[in-house]
Amino acid sequence: MIETTNFSVDEFDLDRSFYNKVIDHSLAKDNWPIVYILSDGTKKVAYVGETIDTISRMKMHFSHELKQKLTAIHLISSDQFNKSVTLDIESNLIKYMAADKQFTLLNGNLGIANHNYYQKNKYWDLFVELWNKLQKKGLAERSLSFIENLNLFKYSPYKSLSAEQNEGLLNILKSLAEDTHKNTLVEGGAGTGKSILAIFLFKLLTTSTEDLNFQEFGENEVEIISLVEKIKKEKPNFKMALVIPMSSFRKTLQNVFSQINGLSPQMVVGPSEIASQRYDLVVVDEAHRLRQRVNLGAYFGSFDQASKKLGLDSKKNNELDWILQQADRTVFFYDANQSIKPSDVPKESFDRLIASPATRKQKLHSQFRVRGGNDYVEYIDRLLNGRLVPGANKFKHPNYDLKLFYSLEQMVEKIKQKNKGEGLSRLIAGFSWPWVSNPKKRKKPEWEPYDIIEDGVYLRWNTTDKDWINTPGSEDEVGCIHTTQGYDLNYAGIIFGNEISYNPDNNEIIVHKEKYHDKNGKNTINDPQRLVDYVINIYKTMMLRGIKGTYIYVCDKDLRNYFSQFIPVIEQRQEAIIKVLPSAEVKRYVNSVPLYHLTALAGGFSDVQAVEYADWIELPAGITPSEDLFACRVVGNSMNKVIPDGAICLFNRNITGSRGGKTLLIELRDYTDPDTESAFTVKEYWSKKIVLEDGFFHTEIILKPNSRDPNYKNIVVTPDMAEDMKILGVYERVLDGDLSIN
């Protein structure tokens, strides 16, 4: 939160009496920049806006057919707001409220200009506090961190475009409005925002021009307005489709389109559906996964049927040909480095398309997914292609967690911890193991064999190939390239199988074809290097799934030794320091102390039954159990200079002396910690107070992180928050955890 900026959220009935009441609002009456939310709590409809003339803007809304039916207005104001700040808050509210789904938004605008301004990062802290207040008032339901894990948020068109994406959009619109180019091909690596641009285009062309806010487009505003209006005038019933070659990702985007006003899941189709009708525009995301008639398995029949319907020779055409034939205009989002098997349309076909004078070309370079940015992307490319020099510094980035594990069990545990604390953390592996647990091929449905047995760990492949990442239970399974390509994860735990190795003599990656179990991925391949290229593309693509971090376990010894030269290593940990006692051996607070789950701490131990929901653990030698001591697991990296992520820590309820500078476990009821996904947080406590004759009072309370990650900020406890703040214990020491991280 901004330590020097206060703001208010004032609620009014939205009727004719509003004008008389708002006269008493000093900022609204003085034409100060303000953000507002119009809403109807019964119909669950809302509209978000910003203005410097509140009264005039409300009069305009009263004349709008839909907005005049809204019943309440919340004015969000501060005397330190400026136009840039209110535009930013408005944009964030639209993005998060649209994905929260507490209200259906009437907004048509696709986000506001993505620009920087003075202290922008500090105003994000203010937005976090604002969201907490909106939750308290019933205008928001879910936490920001929860929303950020939703597909509806990740693929929302209510996002600002980068300068590169803006330029790409402009070129696409030119191709649609003019007769100079039939095709547009946008090249970009994993995480460069191709899918967002595709969805943004669909929303732009399906939203009434009157409801669009073209400030998003900056200096291109006038030109884009002109192009959009020309397209809609010439094609009032513009027919378009978004082709997604992979069935899993297709299902995900169909679900997203079903929740966005103006879009429909029927707009998202597979390549074979294109054969049924012509389109004004066909957009293909993940175009590198379009197929040719090679190693198609059960899809051979559908492929031949679609070719016949189009009057094409099935043995000489591919899905790229279908789309070029069936669309007046096309847009392809393409990355040659994500082609992963022989059935993919060959690069030569796309090279011919790119070379055609009928094709407009555009490139995206900026990295939007992984927080390691282009540095990480380039490092992984050099690593997998043998272009790193031995003795070079290991990869290190303040915003990205790349680790090599020597214990698969430890990596699996770490991913599960991340999934519990931050969500969207999954295991992914290469095709080094056959899918014996495939529910469609098991002779006995009740028999559930393990697929991956490695390093004493037993795991199963994904039980579904449709939207696997978001399927309940996927956190206990292992996905593959087919169930993760196109998706975002917070953390990816990648198992490099025995099919991929390293030749130290030649400094090159090698692939053992006999250990590679994707039959359709290796049949018909005669050139060994071609298979190596496919397998490297698979692992590179998987290593670009994790937004915050990538954890790696390598089965092959030579490859593991090679990776260990360049990736920070987590050594296999020793025996756990602590021991959970069987219930028969427990003597509470005599030979053990409780290990609480955070949910049991709600209310600050006010519930005497909380101990029934705890494990009881022995303490290390030299520490005497007492009723003041308890333990709990601390998740996240906000205190990682002292407390590793996932460590079990000892706390003391009895806090003596000043709290200043001590690390405390605190419950803040109107605050959600992004690490714990709860109201509990572990931070250093600092305060300023005034001493009076009869006591003292705090003028300011600050909870400080102690982290290597500079993105963690101070929590400033407001007077309202302080009333509900409970200090549960003072930190004593780490009992167990990934001590090697230090």
Image (cartoon, grey):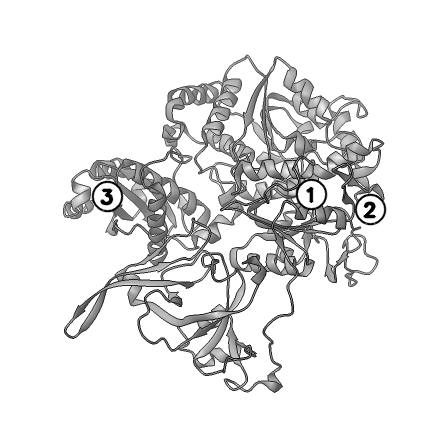
User: Rounded to the nearest whole Å, what is the CA distance between mark 1 and mark 3?
Assistant: 49 Å
Check disc 2: other Cα within 10 Å, few if <14, some if 14-19, many if 20+: some
| Residue 67 on image: x %, y % | 32, 41
Amino acid type for the residue under numbered disc 2: Lys
Disc on the earlier residue, 1 or 3: 3
Does the image show residue 211? yes
SS for tag 3? loop
Q: Quadrant of residue 280?
A: top right
| Residue matched to label 2 | 515
Mark toward the viewer: 1 or 3:
3
Residue 206 place in picture, x, y as percent: 48, 31
* Disc 1 and disc 3 in contact, CB within 8 angstroms: no
Task: Tell me where residue 567 appears, x and y as whole percent.
Answer: 62, 47
Q: CA distance from mark 3 to mark 2?
A: 63 Å
Question: Which comes sooner in the sequence, label 3 or label 2?
Answer: 3
In this rendering, position of residue 208 left or right of residue 699 = right
Q: Residue at x 48, y 53 (%)?
A: 146
Q: Position of residue 128 (x, y in %)?
A: 37, 51
Q: Which residue is mark 3?
A: 80
**For residue 668, side relative to residue 480 (left or right):** left
- Which residue position holds label 1? 482
Residue 556 visible? The answer is: no
What residue do we see at 72% from left, 53% from top? 461
